[in-house]
Image (tube, grey):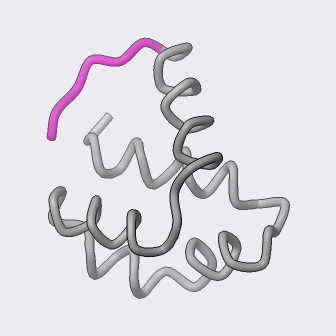
């Protein structure tokens, strides 16, 4: 997946993901973008999601950028 999102568009996407994604959605997106192993093996992403940790927003943004190769 290669995208040319502007900064505001990327933040809007991240906000939607943070609001709506669960672990299954992250795994599905990981499978679609060849990053499933990174999603499942990251020590914080899914844990932060399930525990509602403060660093989840930043991790979501980092992973979206990685998945979109931007």
Q: In which quarter of the image is residue 29?
A: bottom left
- Out of 51 and 33, give the one closest to the viewer: 51
Figure check: 45 above or below 3: below
Magenta residues, start to end = 1-6
Residue that lies at the very extreme toward the right in this rendered image: 54
Main secondary structure along the magenta-highlighted residues: loop
State the image coordinates of residue 34 (x, y, percent, origin top left). 15, 65
Figure check: 69 above or below 66: above
- Residue at 49% x, 31% y is 13
Q: Please say whether residue 11 is one of the residues in the magenta stretch.
A: no
- Side (left or right) of 6 relative to 59: left
- Out of 35 and 52, give the one closest to the viewer: 52
Figure check: 4 above or below 36: above
State the image coordinates of residue 43 (x, y, percent, origin top left). 57, 85
- Residue at 51% x, 57% y is 21
**Quadrant in which the N terminus is drawn:** top left
């Amino acid at each position: 997946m290669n995208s040319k999102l502007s900064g505001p568009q990327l933040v809007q996407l991240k906000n939607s993901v943070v609001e709506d994604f669960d672990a299954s959605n992250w795994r599905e997106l990981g499978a679609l973008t060849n990053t499933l192993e990174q999603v499942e093996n990251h020590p914080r992403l899914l844990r932060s999601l399930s525990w509602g940790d403060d660093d989840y927003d930043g991790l979501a943004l980092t992973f979206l950028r990685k998945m979109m190769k931007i």
